[in-house]
Image: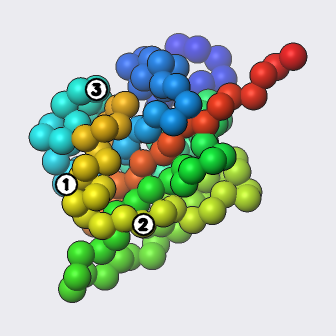
Amino acid sequence: MLKGINPIVSPNLLKALSEMGHGDEILLSDSHFPGHTLCSNNLLRGDGLEIPDLLEGILPLFELDSYDAPLIMMSAVDGDVLDPSVEESYMSVVKKFLPEAAVPLRIDRFAFYDRAKAVFSCVITGTTAKYGNIILKKGVTPSYD
């Protein structure tokens, strides 16, 4: 165990976050997401973990991109309705660390699936919320001169 790192961040997740470069993306998926099909490259399991809790552990360690949309979520499919409490629960954590953060960019289901195929890493969580997936785009970590 390391000091200052939320214990929800597993050693494998910490390694993935550390290895990511500027512009790389990590997907925190709900438990319904076809992660094994779409993200077989660097798939991590977070069974039983909820995405807001993972955000709480990740965001102190992770600089979000300041150039492109750093948060991406799936739009509802025609006929479905988004539950606004899902995004609100994520953004309440994000705003704790980044008060000026914009709401997530919403993209359609198949564009999201295509994007998921290219993520650096995917964490399949225990979150059961419909449309509960969120992609985080890594930014440049400030220097500590």
Verify CB contact (< 8 Å) between mark 1 and mark 2.
no
Residue under label 3, please give it.
Answer: 42
Residue appearing at x 23%, y 36% in the figure: 39
Q: Amino acid at mark 3?
A: Asn
- Measured from the top left, where is residue 106 in percent x and y? 42, 66
Of the two numbered discs 3 and 1 in the rendering, the one whose residue sits closer to the viewer: 3
Verify CB contact (< 8 Å) between mark 2 and mark 3.
no
The local crowd at label 2, few if under 14, some if 14 to 19, many if 20 or more residues have their Cα within 10 Å, is some
Eyeballing the image, is 69 above or below 108? Answer: above
The local crowd at label 1, few if under 14, some if 14 to 19, many if 20 or more residues have their Cα within 10 Å, is some
Q: Secondary structure at mark 1?
A: loop
Which of disc 1 and disc 3 is earlier in sequence?
1
**Image mark for residue 130:** none
Q: Amino acid at mark 1?
A: His
- Measured from the top left, where is residue 64 in percent x and y? 60, 42
Q: Secondary structure at mark 3?
A: loop
Q: Residue furthest top?
A: 1
Of the two numbered discs 1 and 2 in the rendering, the one whose residue sits closer to the viewer: 2
Q: Amino acid at mark 2?
A: Arg
Q: Residue furthest right?
A: 145
Q: Quadrant of residue 11?
A: top left
Which of disc 3 and disc 2 is earlier in sequence?
3
Residue 117 visible from this viewpoint: yes
- Return the residue nearer the eye: 107 or 9: 107
Residue appearing at x 66%, y 46% in the figure: 66
- Measured from the top left, where is residue 62 in percent x and y? 60, 33
- Measured from the top left, where is residue 7 in percent x and y? 51, 27
